[in-house]
Image (spheres, rainbow, N blue to C red):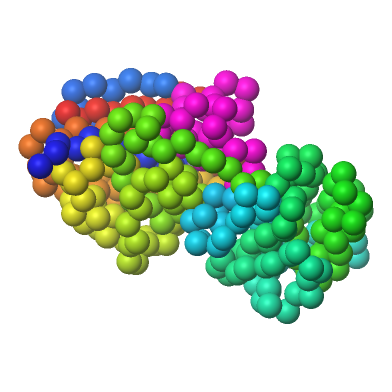
Amino acid sequence: MNTSRVMVIVDGAGKGDYSAWQTLKDAHAVYYETHTPSGMAADSLCCIMTLLGYSRESIPFGRAYLEAVSAGIPVGKTDAAFRLNGVDIRDGRLVSSGICRDVSSLRLPEGMEAFSLSAYRGLLVVSNASELADKIVTYPPHENIGRAVSEMKVRCPDNKLENELNSLYDEGFWPWGQSGYMYLPPYSSIHGRSGCVVTATEIVRGIAVSGGMACPRLGDVTADIDTSLSAKTSAVLEVAGRYDDIYVHINGADEASHRGDPDEKAAFMHRIEDEVIKPLLSELPDGTGLTVTSDHYTDPKTKGHDSVEVPVIKYY
Ligand SMILES: [Zn+2]
């Protein structure tokens, strides 16, 4: 049986968020570093890829391709994938970016196919647009609530595709976050070690699947504070020894920060220690390394990400 290294990635937790943990006294090392590549904005995708050992060059521009991979939606080598939100537009302004709409009601031109992911989130696959993906300008809807839609028209070097994408607004759908087909070097070829990622977050699942890592399906996980943390702990204990490197991604602290709720975040951090860290410390096979860190800090005051240094806690 191999001994594994386990890394718990607590999304959005900063230095102060760990300070109440009783297990810190058991750590043999705590240091601070940023996982945001220089010149990039602190988002989960680039920070988690950095933690997995991917170089800055292999980090994709948009997220949609990885989300498609995660959902098992086929994206061919010449296709582009877009995220597709259900939106509410009133008096020419974007009012909401989280409207549940049935993508099957969409009348799409040839070469476009839409898929539902969950609730208000969908994906649009556009054939023969892979090369164009980086040159198309789209706007993240959740960051542009209240703004005039006329200022946020999709711009694309191909006029026909530009018109087709803009016509989706009229049907209450918002294409954004596009990316073309992407090759990610296998994790095992970078490290010479096998990898497994325990996560319920689609983008993280997309990285894992694209990088040829194992990514077990979990029950009762929600990628928010109502998740079953014990389901994640059990999944780690189940695969311990079967892979060289095991990553556990926990998303709820980031979600609580985006909601601007420090109390909710603190309560969830407490749960992580009780339901993940303590059981792993006592139940992982002897010799297994356990590290806890964050991808980036998310500040409940600003509700935004920050590239400041975050703790790296090494238990053994
Ligand atoms: Zn994150």
Residue 54 included in the magenta stretch of the image: yes
| 59 or 93, nearer to the observer | 59
Residue at x-position 91% and y-position 52% = 159
Residue at x-position 7% and y-position 37% = 286
| 44 or 267, nearer to the observer | 44
Image x and y of residue 145, in percent:
76, 54
Q: Which residues are magenta?
A: 34-63
Residue at x-position 73% and y-position 43% = 131
Image x and y of residue 114, in percent:
67, 67
In which quadrant of the rendered view does residue 269 lie? top left
Image x and y of residue 99, in percent:
68, 69
Q: What residue occupies the far bottom of the structure in this picture?
A: 105
> Would residue 208 be found to the left or right of residue 237 on screen?
right
In which quadrant of the rendered view does residue 221 lie? bottom left
> Would residue 1 be found to the left or right of residue 44 on screen?
left
Residue at x-position 24% and y-position 28% = 314
